[in-house]
Image (cartoon, rainbow, N blue to C red):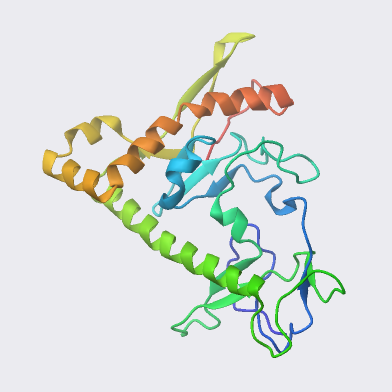
């Protein structure tokens, strides 16, 4: 069973293998009770389709660099996820980004020249394998079982949402609306020494006010403007995240240089 070409694997994935009825005819998926793959990840990619739901639970920021990506922050410091415990269990009833729910599947090109995407999976995911119990991946006739049909549909919708997300980012870049972010958070016990969080990007409110009325009306009609507002409103949750970290004993040290991105 050959793995798909993988010069750089996405976050969570340790390997990537094409799914097929020949090699995986007897494979099954067991029920999982924890999201071990999410442990230690403080920032998870997000699509614009999820902004409205995600902004209720997480700050939404953009990654630094020339190709910014929307991120849902589940912690403010590298390696800290305030919503997942040491056993990998979700500790609060929060929205889980589609990027998390997609794992261990994803659509990928089997060769650099391929025009189509194929359903692949991470074979290191322990709940998928040649087990006696669990939900089958393929029927006796070799056709994808409902579980795989649903996974394929989910991944297809994720790719479509990814295209809409890129169009949203392109529009922000076109109007030069993204700027380097910085937020200062003061702990009650050290009011004179705020923690500065950098390493992410956010919408520049001043430049947003300068956007023409015609463009704003177009954005409002297309749904882009509410997405910008969802991102901006969600930034207030940075302080909530900070408080969660302090309560969990994972807050930053006074001499640390935090990086939220």
Q: Position of residue 218 (x, y in %)?
A: 18, 48
Q: Is residue 53 left or right of residue 149?
A: left
Q: Position of residue 107 (x, y in %)?
A: 54, 72
Compared across the picture, whether 232 is left or right of 103 comes to left
Residue 67, located in which quarter of the rendered image? bottom left
Residue drawn at point x = 85 percent, y = 70 percent: 133
Residue depicted at 38% across the width and 33% down the height: 232
What x and y, as percent, mark residue 85?
A: 76, 39
| Residue 214 shows up from this direction | yes
Q: Which residue is at a point 49% across and 62% down the rendered structure image? A: 158
In this rendering, position of residue 216 left or right of residue 182: left
Q: Residue at x 66, y 27 (%)?
A: 245
Residue 218 in the image: above or below residue 29: above
Residue 69 seen in render: no
Q: Is 238 left, or right, of 181 in this rendering? A: right
Quadrant in the rendering for residue 205: top left
Quarter of the figure with the N terminus? bottom right
> Is 231 located above or below residue 116 in the figure?
above
Residue 188: horizontal and vertical position, in percent?
61, 10
């Amino acid at each position: 069973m050959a793995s798909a070409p993988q010069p750089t694997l996405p976050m969570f994935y340790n390997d990537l293998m094409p799914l097929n009825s020949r090699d995986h005819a007897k494979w099954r998926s067991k029920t999982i009770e924890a999201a071990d793959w999410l442990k230690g990840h403080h920032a998870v990619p997000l699509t614009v389709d999820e902004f409205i739901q995600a902004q209720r639970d997480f700050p939404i920021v953009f990654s630094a660099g020339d190709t910014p990506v929307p991120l849902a922050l589940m912690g403010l410091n590298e390696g800290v996820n305030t919503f997942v415990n040491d056993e990998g269990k979700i500790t609060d009833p929060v929205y889980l980004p589609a990027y998390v729910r997609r794992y261990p599947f994803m659509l990928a090109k089997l060769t650099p020249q391929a025009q189509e995407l194929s359903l692949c999976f991470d074979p290191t995911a322990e709940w998928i394998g040649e087990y006696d119990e669990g939900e089958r991946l393929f029927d006796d006739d070799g056709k994808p079982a409902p579980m795989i049909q649903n996974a394929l549909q989910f991944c297809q919708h994720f790719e479509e949402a990814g295209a809409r997300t890129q169009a949203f980012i392109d529009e922000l870049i076109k109007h030069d609306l993204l700027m380097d972010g910085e937020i200062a958070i003061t702990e009650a016990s050290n009011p004179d020494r705020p923690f500065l969080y950098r390493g992410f990007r956010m919408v520049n409110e001043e430049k947003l006010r300068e956007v023409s009325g015609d463009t704003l009306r177009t954005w409002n009609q297309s749904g882009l403007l509410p997405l910008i507002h969802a991102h901006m409103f969600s930034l207030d949750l940075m302080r909530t995240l900070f408080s969660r970290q302090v309560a969990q004993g994972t807050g930053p040290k006074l001499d640390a240089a935090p990086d939220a991105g």
